[in-house]
């Protein structure tokens, strides 16, 4: 049947059918180990966001290294993780709509489920669905961290919603979700640090306000791949939720570190393997276009440099030179996505490679959700 082909372990990477979504397993494992070590050293909980990889296998690898649970973005992702045996899931997003709320409430009978709220009416609907399901759900009040993002303003609005959670049977106020998404992609380190510190100060004020009203804020969660170390060192956040660090992508590679050099805390472990299918004067055409790699945030980088991905169509990408000769007909190239999350969502499986051979093939369990 169409699309059913799967590479077998032991197959040389050079013999993979392309386009293929490939994971360098050794680089992946180093990334997982490094983030786990940072969290341990800082004394904060690690709750990685699995919307990056959508894989129960990789989520399990993160848990084996000490993660307390996982973050997901949708109810469907939560169902995929719980169905794969993950037992502590935080939906780091608002869930709206009777059908989705029923599914979330039922899922809470099988696992520890937490969800974000930023609206009193939605909170009432959540409480009703959970009561009808006979389950219990943790609630994180989402704090607005930047313009044009979800969440209630810090201070009194957050306090009012936390009080409403406390007064709703079957719901547990767990803490504050304060993920500063905008700061993740601020390129220079001083500006990224300043944005994180401003946000952290507002979080601390809200935590103090809750405490004065007798509401314990057990968890302050946030921090992504771009700022994970800043929240971990803040002494305000006690949980970080990075996602992209497992794979890295060209967008995060554009960030700068505190010395002004390239942000290289983690390695690129994910790439789209493509094959040159046509050669013309001055260009090489590969079999990876819009259907093989997410291009919404920009064009991918060609690993190794010297060649530029210039244009795309549905099934084709056009490479041009910027120095070295272009690859010949039948040669393979590795493409680093600008945004790995939606790229993963285009594939049924991840091909894990070690020492130049296929070592594992993992389903993208939450694909399409």
Image (cartoon, rainbow, N blue to C red):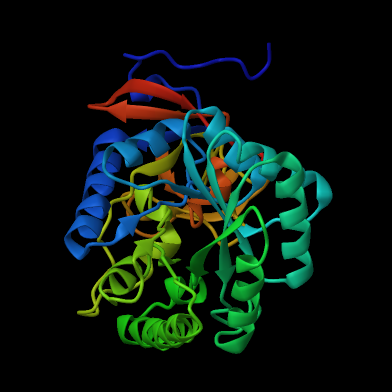
Residue 259: percent from left, percent from top: 20, 79
Can you see residue 219?
yes
Judge whether 13 appears above or below 326 on screen. above
Q: Quadrant of the N terminus?
A: top right
Q: Quadrant of residue 361?
A: top left
Residue 233 locus on image (x, y percent): 25, 73
User: Is residue 367 something that shows in the picture?
Assistant: no
Q: Residue at x 72, y 64 (%)?
A: 123
Image coordinates of residue 138 in percent, x first then y, are: 56, 55
Residue 199: image quadrant is bottom left
State the quadrant of the C terminus: top right
In the image: residue 101, left or right of residue 337: right
The answer to which of 317 and 296 lies nearer the viewer is 296
Question: Viewed as shown, does residue 270 lie left or right of 135?
Answer: left
Say which residue appears at 61% left-offset and 47% top-offset: 136
Toward the right, the furthest residue is 98
Q: Nearer the viewer, residue 132 or 236?
A: 132
Q: How many marks?
A: 0
Residue at (29%, 34%) from the top-left corner?
25
Q: Residue at x 62, y 74 (%)?
A: 163
Image height of 29 relative to 130, above or below: above
| Residue at the farthest left position | 41
Residue 56 point in image, percent of width and height = 46, 33
Viewer-nearest residue: 1 or 148 = 148
């Amino acid at each position: 049947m169409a699309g059913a082909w799967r590479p077998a372990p032991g197959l040389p990477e050079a013999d993979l059918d392309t386009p293929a979504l490939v994971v360098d397993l050794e680089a992946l494992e180093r990334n997982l180990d490094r983030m786990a070590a940072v969290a341990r050293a800082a004394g904060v909980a690690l709750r990685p966001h699995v919307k990056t990889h959508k894989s129960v296998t990789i989520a399990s690898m993160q848990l084996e290294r000490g993660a307390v649970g996982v973050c997901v973005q949708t109810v469907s992702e939560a169902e995929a993780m719980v169905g794969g045996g993950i037992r502590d899931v935080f939906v780091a997003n608002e869930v709206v709509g009777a059908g989705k709320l029923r599914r979330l409430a039922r899922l809470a009978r099988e696992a520890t489920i937490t969800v974000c709220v930023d609206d009193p009416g939605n909170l009432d609907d959540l409480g009703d669905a959970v009561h009808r399901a006979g389950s219990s759900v943790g609630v994180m009040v989402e704090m607005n961290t930047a313009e044009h993002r979800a969440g209630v303003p810090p201070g009194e609005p957050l306090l009012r919603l936390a009080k409403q959670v406390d007064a709703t049977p079957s719901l547990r106020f767990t803490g504050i979700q304060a993920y500063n998404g905008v700061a993740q992609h601020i390129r220079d380190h001083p500006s990224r640090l300043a944005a994180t510190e401003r946000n952290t100060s507002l979080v601390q004020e809200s935590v103090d306000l809750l405490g004065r009203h007798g509401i314990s804020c057990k968890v302050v969660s946030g921090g992504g791949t771009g700022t994970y170390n800043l929240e971990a060192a803040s002494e305000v956040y006690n949980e970080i939720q990075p996602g992209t660090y497992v794979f890295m992508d060209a967008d995060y590679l554009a960030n700068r570190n505190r010395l002004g050099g390239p942000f290289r805390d983690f390695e690129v472990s994910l790439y789209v393997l493509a094959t040159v299918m046509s050669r013309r004067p001055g260009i090489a055409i590969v079999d990876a276009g819009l259907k093989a790699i997410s291009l919404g945030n920009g064009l991918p980088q060609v690993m190794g440099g010297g060649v530029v991905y210039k244009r795309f169509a549905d099934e084709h990408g056009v490479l041009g030179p910027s120095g070295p000769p272009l690859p010949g007909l039948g040669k393979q190239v590795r493409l680093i996505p600008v945004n790995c999350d939606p790229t993963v969502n285009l594939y049924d499986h991840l091909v894990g490679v070690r020492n130049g051979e296929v070592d594992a093939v993992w389903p993208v369990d939450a694909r399409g959700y």
